[in-house]
Amino acid sequence: MKISRQMLSSSHRLWTMANKNIKQEVVNGIWNKVLTLDTMNQCVKTMEYAVLGPTMLRAMELERELQQGVKKPFTEIIKGFKGDAHAMGQKPITFMCQVLALCQYPDLLSSPSFPEDAKKRARRILEACEGHSTGSYSASAGIQMIREDVARYMEHRDGGIASDPENIFLSTGATSSIMAVLNLLVSGKGKNRTGVMIPIPQYPLYSATLAQFDAVQINYYLNEERHWELDVAELQGALNQAKAHCQPRVLCVINPGNPTGQVLSRENIEAVIRFAYEEHLFLMADEVYQDNIYAEGSQFHSFKKVLMEMGPPYAQQLELASFHSCSKGYVAKCGFRGGYTEVVNMDPAVKQQMLKLVSVWLCPPVPGQIVMDIVTNPPQPGDPSYEQFQQEKKAVLSDLAEKALLTEKILNKQPGIHCNPVQGAMYSFPRIQLPPKALQRAEELGQPADLFFCIQLLEETGICVVPGSAFGQKDGTYHFRMTILPPLEKLKIVLEKLNQFYAKFTQEYS
Amino acid sequence: MKISRQMLSSSHRLWTMANKNIKQEVVNGIWNKVLTLDTMNQCVKTMEYAVLGPTMLRAMELERELQQGVKKPFTEIIKGFKGDAHAMGQKPITFMCQVLALCQYPDLLSSPSFPEDAKKRARRILEACEGHSTGSYSASAGIQMIREDVARYMEHRDGGIASDPENIFLSTGATSSIMAVLNLLVSGKGKNRTGVMIPIPQYPLYSATLAQFDAVQINYYLNEERHWELDVAELQGALNQAKAHCQPRVLCVINPGNPTGQVLSRENIEAVIRFAYEEHLFLMADEVYQDNIYAEGSQFHSFKKVLMEMGPPYAQQLELASFHSCSKGYVAKCGFRGGYTEVVNMDPAVKQQMLKLVSVWLCPPVPGQIVMDIVTNPPQPGDPSYEQFQQEKKAVLSDLAEKALLTEKILNKQPGIHCNPVQGAMYSFPRIQLPPKALQRAEELGQPADLFFCIQLLEETGICVVPGSAFGQKDGTYHFRMTILPPLEKLKIVLEKLNQFYAKFTQEYS
């Protein structure tokens, strides 16, 4: 064992220590850190979260360079990588801003410049907060009054099917409730380890969380040829294969799809429910894009509603957790981190455990809960803010619908790019053919080929999108995810630019 | 295998399934849920979080009964269980309310009724948000400008010692960063499993998180006889014992102490740092009560400052994560879930991993980040809001100091109760002698004796406190934790009432 010069020069105490036992932290005179890539939690190390991955990191660098005056072939970064409507210039809903301001600075309640229903709402929320202050903790499952508003909202949404506020857990975005439910579900060792079925392509929160919890990820592929439909034969095949090496216990479905934008039909949902029931799976329905439905003939059906309408034995037995968020829809208050889960047919003892789990985190952010309250209990006809609220909501949603259609149309003009209809959510996920030399170059660089494409796109045009490999895709196919969120006129230009770049790229690498 | 009547009556598909293989979910005609206490994650099942435990749950029930008009020996519940100042009537800081309102409803920026510095601050924050909206996601480690404000704050706090914004991760309260750092640190199997040293009594976030991560909890006891001092010989003893069955890699210190209220001396902190260095431990310093210092002669010394002033080899090598929050101090905006960690000497590759980990959660709530910005960058002399801000801050802190002293004084009047000085934080943690018959009765009920006392206290007086067993304590000693947060006049009455109840209780069970 060698002792470094630095250590030799330090106190006598160090000598005592060095002689006490051979410490692995000082090897060949080099102090080793306690926490390194080798010693850290390997589950965290393994996990990937590529939405905020290499293309985003490079885009941030480029943006800094632009700010410093470095010349680029473009003048701004187009952030098509993140489902963040306000970052792309979407205007907030006025009533929501007013209620938030009133709740956080109650002196404003005496101001004549706020509509009466905003004041009434703020008073109602403050009344429900401990000490009548949004500064206090709420109950760990959320403010009781807001849980009740959420329940009534879902009853209304689902044609009168009952919803119990005690089954609703408000959370920090949908993310924290998705993680909580998965955390409860993952158990067992070796072949008994919990297997969780997730769609491919998927929203990478799922794969990341499963890696973190050391659960077994079971991929089922969405059918790109049929508008990313969810095929029960595919579910069955994936499940049968997985049974050899794990205990499949959970099925996750994302509807409307992220990144794939499909909206499941009612028949499809029924088939999924039957499958989950027959295979004794806990069903997790990620429905955060439920307000983002654009395509003619597409309609959102909640898993809860379909399940309940299917009657016995499904309705009484299938365990379901569905998720919603204030980061999407027409509200898109991502930064507020509001969301919730409704659990259905959950063992009451497990529900207690879930309450305990979330109580360690104390409570979801109260401002996010307030936003969730307004989403689920918007102004009603006759209220002073009703007309404006509806107008603003419609403006956002019809603009998104127009952009969804436009995206599909422009991208499909380009030979080599195929884009399924963006029926819902906030993304297109076009398939791109990549020429052999591009594949070869990517391999030389040790990059997935679609990442190589996306980085080149970024460097030449400033357009930042996420490669399909971040979400998963069939081997040998290549995609990227791009939001439909840029302002309409800009989106048109961006898409045309993207097509031009693609044409040039394929020519260059053919 | 039996098939239930309900199943017999259901579809043919079920028959096919039932005949396909014998499903454990249908045993003796009873449908078993996928997720039960037996099948769930046993680490989550094992963990305890008793702050929001039986006394709180019973208090909530009693409160509902009071509201329904049920007669009780008291007219209100005194919520002494939770460090939630606003719930107990603390007034919010005006400047903070103003900036929050302006940021969330920017139309107010044209209103003449806000001071110019609040508007300037709001504009500065909005400028730093994507799309100039608090509705957008921030970077996963927080808004860059706020990370810079935090760094400057710590430099100022620590007498000029440098702080790098890149080492600062804003988070959802301190909770989520404490969990993130622990998550990175826990690894290994069997005897190589990470051991984490935590004080007893502790804030139960630590034990709960360690149980959840299946890490090994190593208890070290604070010295109640010496004002809950942290004794290095005790650390050494606990560590040596633990080495037989795990790999101790982390030392957690809470200063000022929760629930114990002590403020560590500089010498004590130096000794702890030397110990951590010599034993090659990663140091986690929970410093969320750094602004809550009351006792004469007590002073807050940050671990970072002491570490840096100790010079080589400590300053360059010891890995440290310190934590702060907007839920405590004079701000106490618990519901906003703002907080941060500063990591020092962390391996840059691990820091990247930490960034990846937090990016899965997308971002900390932006309103909480705004509060954190104001905590770390308050109005300066000459600013229009400076005087009022300072006045409001001082009023809160001097009121708390008075209540800390009062608590100690009144409780120590009562024979059988001993309360150490509340030097800092927000709690008293008095030791109570319990008579033999009370211990016996508690045992018959299968309750910890201090829980039995606390429940009786609640039922007779409406005062809700948390039993010492929720935090850990030496065997054979009994305590409870009570906040010093009720308004002064009420606190006096509550403490006298508590003493009276204790006298009656001990008489009854002697």
Image (cartoon, coloured by chain):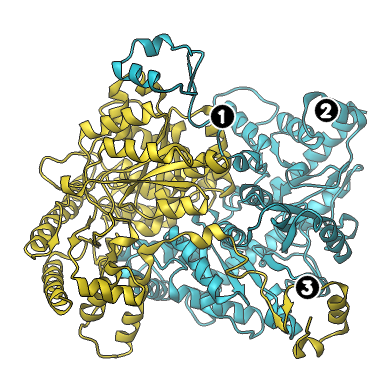
Chain colours: A yellow, B cyan
The x, y position of residue A39, in whole percent, is 63, 66
**Chain of the residue under the numbered disc 2 shown in the image:** B
Q: CA distance from mark 3 to mark 1?
A: 47 Å
Could you tell me which residue is drawn at 39 percent across and 71 percent down?
B122
- Chain identifier of the residue bearing label 3 in the image: A
Q: In front of the other: label 3 or label 1?
A: 3
Residue at screen point 63% across, 58% down: B187
Circle 2 residue: B443
Q: Nearer the viewer, residue A58 or A323?
A: A58
Q: Residue B424: x percent and y percent? A: 74, 62
Q: Amino acid at mark 1?
A: Ala
Same chain for mark 3 and mark 1? The answer is: yes
Q: Dividing the image into 4 quarters, which one contains the N terminus of chain A?
A: bottom right
Above or below A420: residue A317: above
Give the secondary structure at mark 3. Answer: loop
**Is disc 2 placed on a helix, strand or loop?**
helix
Q: Please tell me whether residue A200 is drawn above or below residue A16 in the rendered image.
A: above
Circle 3 is placed at which residue position?
Answer: A23
Residue drawn 35% across the image and 74% down it: B127
Q: Disc 2 to disc 1, how far (Cα)?
A: 25 Å
Report the side of B358 relative to A197 (left or right).
Answer: right
A154 sits left or right of A177 in the view: left
- Locate the C terminus of chain A by quadrant: bottom left
Disc 2 vs disc 1: which is toward the camera? 1
Spatial CA distance of label 3 from label 2 is 47 Å
Number of the front mark, 3 or 2: 3
Mark 1, residue position: A349
Q: Is residue B377 visible?
A: no
